[in-house]
Image (cartoon, helix red, strand yellow):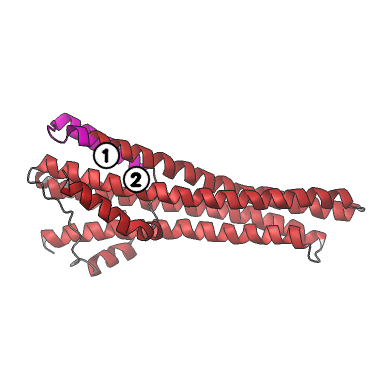
Amino acid sequence: MTEESQHISLSVAMQELFKKSNELVYWSYGVQGFLFTINILIILLKPDKSNEFIWLFFAFSLVIIILSMIVIYHSKKYYSLGESIRKMDMVERIFPNAKNSSEKSYLLSKIPSTIINKAENRQNENTDYYSSREDKYGKLIENVQENSFFTSEIMRFYSKIILGVIGLILILICTSSIYGFYILSESNTNKDLTINIAEYLALLINFLYVLNIIDHYILFNKKSKELKRIDEDLNKIKSNPQEDDIITFFTEYNCILNDALPCPNFAYKIIKNKLNIVWNNRIDNE
């Protein structure tokens, strides 16, 4: 395998890891969303059900939430590995002398074989970072700035989508809770009361779903602001870059992304044209 194909495979492996991380996040959202919807319908529509059914559904809700948390954990593992590869790939492209074969081998050994195979099958794809700058530190600044700008804007846009979903879910929870208190007040038998209590215990478990989404909103919103600040700070030193400052900002940039989650592809596709126009206009006026 040539040195070029190794670079391209590394870059594609990063893309595949981010893609896998995204898929796991969506699976978590989908399963929890379905469970949450069923829970709301049971409360609002009041279908015929036994006491045992409701308590079984409560236990099932708890299991699903735990499994969802496990899925999110693995999603973050894929993302963290993808971030490590992204950093290595960027540094090697800009600073060829910084290559470390043993470190690369150790990092590649952590990648699942299925993703390695996909990277090998796509090794001829052109995934090079583009920069019009000639000096290495200038290239590093431009790459970090471009990545910071696009990632920040996508995260900001996605955080707004999450905020809308949170608002909708909270409205559903409030509506069903008000209705539920009315039903509880109308319960005449211990059986009815027990069933309704179990229903709302299941709803309480599903509320963790909302907390999980709120956590993602806070994460994307925070990272968006931090990346915007990195972009602005690099712009201030761009005309007279100092090695120590560049390395400091590059390290901070990587730390910001290290505990993040990958930007969803659908969010990027929605605003891609706008971001490309804004970025190209910015480059043309520098």
Residue at the limit of the structure toward the right, as seen here: 188
Query: Counting other residues with Cα less than 10 Å from the Cα at mark 1, is it few (<14), some (14-19), or many (20 or more)?
Result: many
Judge whether 103 appears above or below 112 on screen: above
Counting residues from the start of the chain, the first of labels 1 and 2 encountered is 2
Residue at the limit of the structure toward the bottom, as seen here: 121
Q: Secondary structure at mark 1?
A: helix
> Residue drawn 26% across and 39% down?
231
Residue 246 pos. (x, y %): 18, 34
Query: Counting other residues with Cα less than 10 Å from the Cα at mark 2, is it few (<14), some (14-19), or many (20 or more)?
Result: many
- The answer to the question of whether label 1 and label 2 lie on touching residues, with beta carbons closer than 8 A, is yes
* Residue 247 lies in the magenta-colored region: yes
Q: Is residue 190 visible?
A: yes
Q: Amino acid at mark 1?
A: Asp
Quarter of the view holding residue 59: bottom right
Residue numbers of the magenta segment: 234-260
Horizontal side of residue 215 vs 236, given as left or right: right
The residue carrying mark 2 is 152
The residue carrying mark 1 is 231
Q: Amino acid at mark 2?
A: Ser
